[in-house]
């Protein structure tokens, strides 16, 4: 029996739409869950003052600084490394066993739990290299942790740039690097930005890897060799040690509002860049 | 575009590294037990208010990190809430700075108020599986325990004695998550630091002794575990001063008023 | 007559499939050479061999020599980038890069380090005019090239090549997707351009070759069957295969 | 004018590529170095196939955790992959671009929510629902799978959307012009053309699901049990490492790293199966 295409069409729209609505409902629920518990504690004082009385009172100012610095450092290190790696893999070498192994290895490392990255960073950066619990140890560890995501998403984005663009660019006398710079990367930008945003998210939300490497000191850092505490770690400590649920959710709510602003503005910037180009 | 981004990030990294300013204070780092971390932070704040020339940093990471980092020198003071210190800690000077009472808690809907030590043991070993066997409603018991190695669990098992935790017991790895689990399951029983009892959970009497600061200090309530500070070599200089401060009446008062018990 | 390309004993392989078999001939300067032949005859491969675009395909391999102004372009120290600047190419499908019309045109010159705004402006006008496109787009140079029609896009691609000021222009079936009017415009442009450039035009349309080219080469199954004066090829070919093809008996 | 020659660029890129890859290799070596000696000392067979995990008695068997890891990952993929890919298809094919520009960053926001927050939502909301409706302790394999499935949604959706949007419009137009409905076009053209990206999204999502610790620790219950139903409490390999690492010393610590080695092998196997299986399905279409 053959079902008329119109019905499969209707069915498909219903199933896909249903799945989308379910996904969005979950998303909205999670955001509301956090905001409902967290918004009541957020005010200017909460954002600008230091935690007091073990975090039960006061604000979260030092964690704001940690939350900005750590992921920023990680992204600054990992983004060029990741993009260059994917450019090298997709534009500068032929598809061989080696590239396949590298790609497979990258996929596998994406599944290593963050605590392992944390322990690695603790032994390697904190103790062996003597950086101590510090922004630099944490940033480097997070950078390694998000590398697989950036490499894979950038590679997919680069792959999706039409081959004809490359041919045209080469035929106009461009070198490989000129082609990469002027044609491939700009056209792969949306995909690369997705990878970066997912990585920013992952490093902002990370706890285990951060506690072991950047530490969880509440003092405002005075150099990259000082320890810091991110909002995620603050939430972790307040909630898991059962100190203050109110301030924990206040921290989480601040976190998601901040990330939402960062994400939306990153996309706005990207779209403006694309619009300006063409 | 690409060049500008690269240049900007380069400038950012350099400025971050140069930014280093105004050090030259004596600095002490504590690391380890997450349960004691907030207390250490508060004590450090108080100490630094009196001694502004000292900078104290407090890190978490767990008791194992406390032992390791005191050994490796990553921290001057390790914090550990282990009952029995491991081999690696033998070379460290250990000072008990606080104690922690362990409360056996159930959901507030549960009508039970008292268990004997034997009943506690049988419940956690899986010999008693239904609340009606200890005088409650007819409902299966959900046992919630801490992870193997945890200081709270070791002391709980040691003090109750002969515990061989039943296989399907739920495991949570922090006081906060134990509290949340018990608060959300009417049939559950767990144990946690007595300073964290709130209205969402109900502490039980053990052998008719209430789990309160007074009864613990009086030695009536038995479930208590020590919290250690570990230092490599002998106590001296600012490190000794800080530990002395924690052991002073002011430090001990801070510990007591925030939910732990004084060391002595 | 000045010879641009010497092709000597050229064999070409893709993954051990021989797609060009022992090609030998010479291409003089300032002419239009039309290359005809059925699909799969190797004419596009031959064209792409001339500016080494085949290098981009994995598994390509060459035997023999192609001399460009007397230099072997496949020798290991030959500068491919410089070659491609001298030998421009227009592809079968119009591929404007996703940027403005202006930026498309100056893409090549900018790569060679020309950044002077005035010079670029002159180049843009000159090459667009030569490609018979200037009047249609002169008021919207900053708009996206993707918004042009197919015929306009292909002329843009031609203008883009002209802006590099190459010596040779390779065209790979440039009119395959275009309407007769756009095709006529491109053909007009080509006839005009051969004064300054050497043009090699691969086409599926034998009539087009007859209309615009001075010389015509006929490829079949990787063999160069015949090459000669266009008039002679179309009126009295030496080989029966050529005759069969141009009279439409196969292909 | 040119600072670096083309050859120099290539060399530079090669160095970055290999430094990135060696950083990742270093991690692998680190785990193996810390964990492998234990496996030799304790015996691979006993370690892998014994169900007895009692560190204080010196018993280290991780069989139940291997089983649990496989089930939880499979469960998470069953929840997250279809929802994610379906959502991505719907958003990129049926929803106007302006709306998507809001929805996509918001979905990516989910990736930034600390996993502990997911954990608390699991304990406070999901576990009671499961307990009251299906029985069991609530903290279970099912709860773990659902929470993980939700957590991988941003990865799957975002990366899939990108690769679907990268499919040239002409493909779609070609199919629609032949009288195909939108769904037939998606089914026969779009999915095929964007499969590489969709596979990457699922594999990265699976990586996140296997590697996630905090949320799983909080919602899966962590009993060292071979699960007999989705309602049983389970402990995954990752959970085992994170759960006990903070107090582990000596042999216990080594055993946890050895768990990491096994986890690494499980990941390799799962990745191979996943890429082969997904590729096969995609090719069939």
Image (cartoon, grey):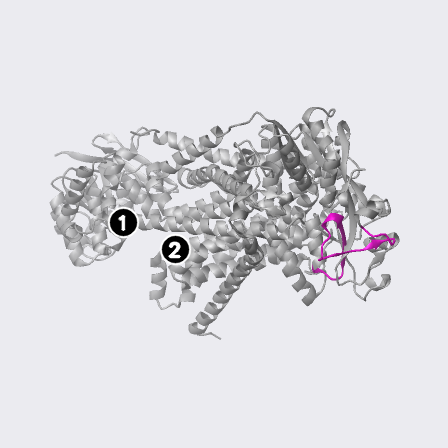
Task: Give the percent coordinates (x, y) of residue C50.
Answer: 26, 39
Task: Give the percent coordinates (x, y) of residue D77.
Answer: 57, 56
Q: Is residue C226 magenta?
A: no
Range covered by the magenta-colored residues: B184-211
Using the rendered view, name the quadrant where residue B106 is placed.
Answer: bottom right
**Is D277 displayed left or right of C106 in the figure?**
right
- Which numbered dot is residue C196? none
Whether labels 2 and 1 belong to a single chain: the reply is no
Task: Give the percent coordinates (x, y) of residue D109.
Answer: 50, 52
Residue corresponding to mark 1: C96
Pinpoint the chain carrying mark 1: C
Residue corresponding to mark 2: D167
Q: How many marks overall?
A: 2
Q: Quadrant of the N terminus of chain B?
A: top left
Using the rendered view, name the quadrant where residue A119 is placed.
Answer: top right
Let me know if residue A114 appears in the view.
no
Task: Give the percent coordinates (x, y) of residue A58.
Answer: 59, 46
């Amino acid at each position: 029996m053959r079902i008329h295409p119109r019905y499969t069409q209707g069915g498909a729209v219903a199933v896909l739409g249903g799945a989308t609505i379910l996904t969005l409902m979950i998303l909205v629920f999670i955001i509301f869950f956090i905001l409902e518990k967290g918004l009541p504690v957020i005010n200017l004082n909460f954002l600008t003052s230091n935690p007091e009385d073990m975090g039960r009172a006061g604000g979260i100012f030092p964690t704001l600084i940690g939350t900005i610095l750590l992921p920023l450092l990680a992204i600054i290190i990992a983004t060029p490394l990741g993009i260059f790696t994917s450019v090298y893999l997709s534009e500068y070498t032929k598809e061989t066993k080696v590239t396949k192994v590298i790609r497979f290895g990258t996929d596998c490392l994406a599944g290593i739990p963050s605590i392992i990255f944390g322990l690695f960073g603790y032994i390697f950066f904190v103790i062996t290299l003597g950086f101590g619990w510090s922004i630099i140890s944490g940033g480097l560890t997070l950078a390694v942790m998000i590398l697989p995501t950036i490499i894979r998403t950038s590679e997919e984005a680069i792959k999706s740039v039409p081959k004809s663009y490359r041919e045209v660019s080469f035929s106009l006398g461009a070198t490989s690097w000129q082609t990469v710079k002027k044609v491939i990367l700009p056209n792969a930008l949306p995909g690369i930005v997705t990878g970066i945003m997912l990585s920013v998210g992952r490093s902002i939300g990370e706890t285990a890897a951060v506690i072991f490497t950047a530490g969880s000191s509440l003092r405002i850092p005075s150099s990259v060799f000082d320890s810091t505490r991110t909002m995620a770690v603050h939430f972790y400590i307040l909630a898991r040690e059962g100190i203050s649920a109110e301030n924990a959710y206040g921290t989480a709510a601040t976190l998601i509002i901040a990330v939402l602003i960062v994400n939306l503005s990153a996309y706005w910037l990207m779209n403006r860049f694309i619009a300006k180009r063409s | 575009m690409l060049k500008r981004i690269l240049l900007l990030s380069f400038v950012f990294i350099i400025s971050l590294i140069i930014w280093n300013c105004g050090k030259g204070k004596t600095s002490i780092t504590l690391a380890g037990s997450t349960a004691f971390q907030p207390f250490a932070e508060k004590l450090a704040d108080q100490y630094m208010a009196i001694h502004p020339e000292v900078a104290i940093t407090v890190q978490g990471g767990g008791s194992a990190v406390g032992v390791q980092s005191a050994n490796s020198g990553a921290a001057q003071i390790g914090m550990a809430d282990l009952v029995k210190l491991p081999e690696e800690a033998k070379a460290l000077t250990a000072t008990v700075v606080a104690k922690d009472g362990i409360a056996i808690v159930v959901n507030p809907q549960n009508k039970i108020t008292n268990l004997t030590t034997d009943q506690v043991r049988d419940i956690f070993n899986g010999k008693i599986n239904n609340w009606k066997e200890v005088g409650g409603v007819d409902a299966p018991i959900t046992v919630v325990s801490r992870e193997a190695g945890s200081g709270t669990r070791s002391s709980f098992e040691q003090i109750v004695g002969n515990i061989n935790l039943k296989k399907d017991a739920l495991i949570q790895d922090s006081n906060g998550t134990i509290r949340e689990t018990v608060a959300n399951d009417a049939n559950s029983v767990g144990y946690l630091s007595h300073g964290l009892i709130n209205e969402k959970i109900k502490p039980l009497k053990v052998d008719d002794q209430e789990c309160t600061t007074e009864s613990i200090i009086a030695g009536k309530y038995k479930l208590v575990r020590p919290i250690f500070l570990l230092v490599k070599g002998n106590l001296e200089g600012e490190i000794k001063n800080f530990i002395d401060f924690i052991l002073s009446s002011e430090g001990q008062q801070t510990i007591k008023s925030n939910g732990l018990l004084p060391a002595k | 007559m000045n010879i641009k390309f010497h092709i000597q004993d050229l064999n070409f392989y893709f993954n051990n499939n021989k797609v060009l078999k022992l090609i030998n001939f010479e291409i003089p300067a300032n002419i239009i050479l039309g290359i005809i032949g059925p699909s799969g005859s190797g004419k596009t491969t031959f064209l792409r061999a001339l500016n080494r675009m085949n290098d981009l395909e994995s598994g390509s391999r060459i035997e023999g020599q192609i001399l460009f102004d007397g230099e072997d372009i496949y020798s290991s120290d030959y500068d491919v980038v410089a070659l491609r600047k001298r030998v421009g190419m227009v592809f079968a499908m119009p591929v404007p890069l996703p940027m403005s019309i202006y930026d498309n045109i100056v893409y090549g010159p900018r790569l060679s380090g020309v950044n002077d705004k005035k010079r670029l402006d002159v180049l843009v006008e000159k090459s667009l005019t030569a490609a018979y496109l200037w009047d249609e787009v002169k008021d919207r140079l900053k708009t996206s090239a993707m918004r042009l029609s197919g015929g306009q896009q292909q002329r843009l691609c031609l203008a883009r090549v002209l802006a590099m000021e190459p010596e040779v222009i390779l065209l790979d079936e440039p009119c395959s997707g275009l309407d007769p009017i756009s095709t006529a415009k491109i053909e007009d442009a080509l006839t005009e351009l051969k004064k300054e450039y050497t043009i090699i035009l691969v086409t599926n349309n034998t009539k087009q070759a007859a209309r615009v080219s001075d010389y015509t080469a006929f490829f079949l199954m990787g063999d160069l069957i015949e090459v000669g004066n266009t008039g002679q090829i179309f009126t009295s070919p030496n080989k029966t295969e050529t005759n069969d093809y141009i009279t439409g008996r196969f292909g | 004018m040119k600072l670096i020659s083309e050859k120099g660029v290539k060399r530079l890129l090669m160095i970055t590529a290999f430094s990135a890859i060696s950083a990742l290799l270093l991690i692998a070596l680190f785990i193996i170095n810390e964990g492998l000696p234990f496996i030799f000392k304790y015996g691979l067979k006993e370690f892998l196939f014994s169900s007895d995990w009692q560190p204080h008695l010196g018993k280290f068997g991780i069989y139940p955790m291997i089983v649990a890891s496989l089930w939880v990952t499979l469960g998470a993929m069953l929840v997250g992959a279809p929802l994610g890919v379906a959502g991505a298809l719907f958003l990129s094919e049926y929803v106007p671009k302006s709306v998507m520009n809001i929805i996509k960053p918001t979905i990516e926001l989910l990736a930034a929510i600390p996993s502990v927050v997911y954990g608390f939502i699991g304990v406070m909301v999901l576990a009671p629902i499961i307990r009251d409706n299906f029985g069991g302790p609530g903290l279970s394999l099912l709860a773990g799978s659902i929470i993980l499935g939700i957590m991988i949604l941003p990865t799957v959706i975002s990366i899939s959307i990108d690769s679907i949007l990268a499919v040239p419009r002409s493909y779609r137009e070609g199919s629609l012009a032949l009288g195909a409905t939108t769904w037939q076009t998606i089914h026969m053209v779009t999915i095929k053309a964007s499969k590489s990206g969709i596979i990457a999204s699922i594999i990265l999502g699976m990586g996140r699901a296997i590697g996630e610790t905090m949320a799983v620790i909080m919602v899966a219950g962590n009993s060292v049990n071979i699960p007999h139903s989705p309602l049983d409490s389970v402990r995954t390999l990752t959970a085992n490492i994170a759960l006990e690492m903070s107090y582990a010393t000596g042999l216990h610590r080594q055993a946890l790293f050895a768990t990491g080695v096994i986890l690494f092998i499980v990941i390799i196997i799962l990745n191979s199966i996943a890429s082969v299986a997904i590729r096969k399905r995609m090719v069939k279409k």
